[in-house]
């Protein structure tokens, strides 16, 4: 009886190993995706926090309207640059670099 159990266990061992590998890869992918989105959310939250602090400084009179506009435009420029930036860089040079 123990011999049959051991034999069936050995027969199913490759399937069990494959299942364990698949689960491990799935967990790894989920962690990577969650980390990516959390980093993006943190960056957006930080920018919003800084802009709200700048608004408060402007309302208190510690920051002039011109200074506020300059700093706000820097945030907008940085955001638009980040949105235009490709996720992966190609090994081939761009047309304008040749």
Image (spheres, rainbow, N blue to C red):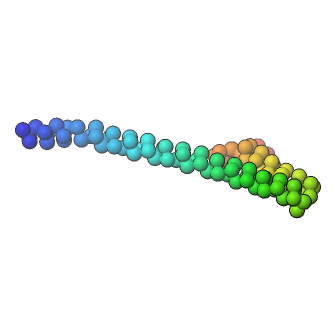
Q: Is residue 58 left or right of residue 48?
A: right
From this viewpoint, is residue 62 visible?
Answer: yes
Question: Between residues 74 and 58, which one lies in front from this camera angle?
Answer: 58
Question: Between residues 19 and 49, which one lies in front from this camera angle?
Answer: 49
Q: Position of residue 96 (x, y in %)?
A: 79, 45
Residue drawn at 24 percent across, 41 percent down: 13
Q: Is residue 83 left or right of residue 58?
A: left
From this viewpoint, is residue 98 visible?
Answer: no
Q: Quadrant of residue 86?
A: top right
Residue drawn at 16 percent across, 37 percent down: 8
Q: Position of residue 53 (x, y in %)?
A: 78, 56
Q: Is residue 28 left or right of residue 36?
A: left
Q: What is the number of callouts on the image?
A: 0
Q: Is residue 96 left or right of residue 68?
A: left
Quarter of the image with the N terminus in it: top left
Residue drawn at 83 percent across, 53 percent down: 55
Residue drawn at 84 percent across, 59 percent down: 57
State the residue lying farthest toward the front: 60
Question: Between residues 84 and 78, which one lies in front from this camera angle?
Answer: 78
Q: Position of residue 84 (x, y in %)?
A: 74, 43
Q: Quadrant of residue 2?
A: top left
Q: Position of residue 93 (x, y in %)?
A: 71, 47
């Amino acid at each position: 009886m123990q011999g049959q159990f051991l034999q069936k266990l050995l027969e199913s061992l490759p399937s069990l190993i494959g299942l364990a590998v698949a689960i491990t890869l799935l967990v790894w992918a989920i962690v990577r995706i969650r980390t990516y989105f959390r980093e993006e959310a943190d960056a957006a939250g930080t920018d919003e926090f800084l802009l709200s602090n700048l608004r408060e400084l402007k309302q208190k009179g510690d920051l002039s309207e011109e200074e506020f506009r300059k700093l706000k435009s820097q945030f907008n420029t940085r955001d638009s640059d980040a949105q235009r930036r490709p996720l992966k860089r190609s090994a081939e040079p761009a047309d304008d670099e040749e």
